[in-house]
Image (cartoon, grey):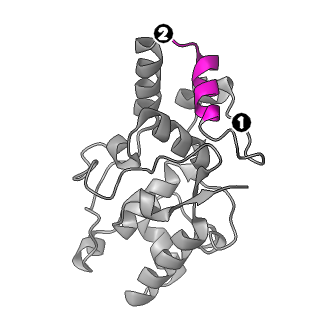
Amino acid sequence: MGADRTARGSAAPAGLADFDLAALHRAMDGQRAARGLTWQRVAREINNTFEGVKTARPVAASTLTGMPSRTSVEGNVVLLVLRWLDRTPESFIPNHPAPTAPGTALPRLPPDRILRWDLQALFATTDAQRRQHGLTWKQVADEIEGFTPGMLTGLAKARHTGFPQVMRLVTWLGQPAVSFTAERSR
């Protein structure tokens, strides 16, 4: 985030750390170990939370165990893991000022529903904030590490996003991540 970002009135503090994928994995492994579960059982429990959504792809145990070696993880998978842990995305951003503030909790859903990123809403909010501050897409991309103008405009039609990148954008917007999620039933 640029230093002038806070001057424009954003709720997002300048210099906030990235979403910590390693900490997410440690929390998942800690929960797994405390409950005496195998990684296959963890994957099964996560997948059971959306068993009635026939078009959703199950999460593989190898996806979960491979998280520490990746620099980016598919955003919808992270949402499922966060739901399993009953944690907010913000709780994995070191020194976040409000990791469990009201309105940050991810919703519990029946097994015929699944939580997904609403990338069109994320795009619309980003575009509205960009316009409000008179910024070009390049200027926005310059303020958010790991984004190009094309990546930002591509959110309008995107179906997937990755962590920690999506949280950089959410933080730039100064809104809770849950604001950009939606229930799906297909």
The residue stretch that appears in magenta: 36-48
Q: Amino acid at mark 2?
A: Gly
Q: Nearer the viewer, residue 119 or 149?
A: 119
Magenta region includes residue 47: yes
141 horizontally vs 91: left or right: right
User: Residue at (28%, 48%) from the top-left corner?
Assistant: 99
Label of residue 58 in the image: 1
Q: Please tell me which of labels 1 and 2 falls first in the chain.
A: 2
Q: Amino acid at mark 1?
A: Pro
Q: Quadrant of residue 133?
A: bottom left
Mark 1 vs mark 2, CA separation in Å: 22 Å
Residues packed near mark 2 inside 10 Å, few (<14), some (14 to 19) or many (20 plus): few
Image: 5 above or below 22: below
Magenta region includes residue 58: no
Percent x, y for residue 28? 46, 26
Image: 33 above or below 151: above
Percent x, y for residue 96? 26, 50
Name the dominant secondary structure of the magenta segment: helix
Image: 25 above or below 154: above
Image: 61 above or below 36: below
Residues packed near mark 1 inside 10 Å, few (<14), some (14 to 19) or many (20 plus): some
Residue situated furthest right in the rendering: 55
Label of residue 36 in the image: 2
Where's the C terminus, which quadrant?
bottom right
Label of residue 125 in the image: none
Percent x, y for residue 53? 71, 47
**Secondary structure state at the residue bearing disc 2:** loop
User: Residue at (35%, 49%) from the top-left corner?
Assistant: 90
25 horizontally vs 173: left or right: right
Percent x, y for residue 32? 48, 18
Q: Nearer the viewer, residue 169 or 49?
A: 49
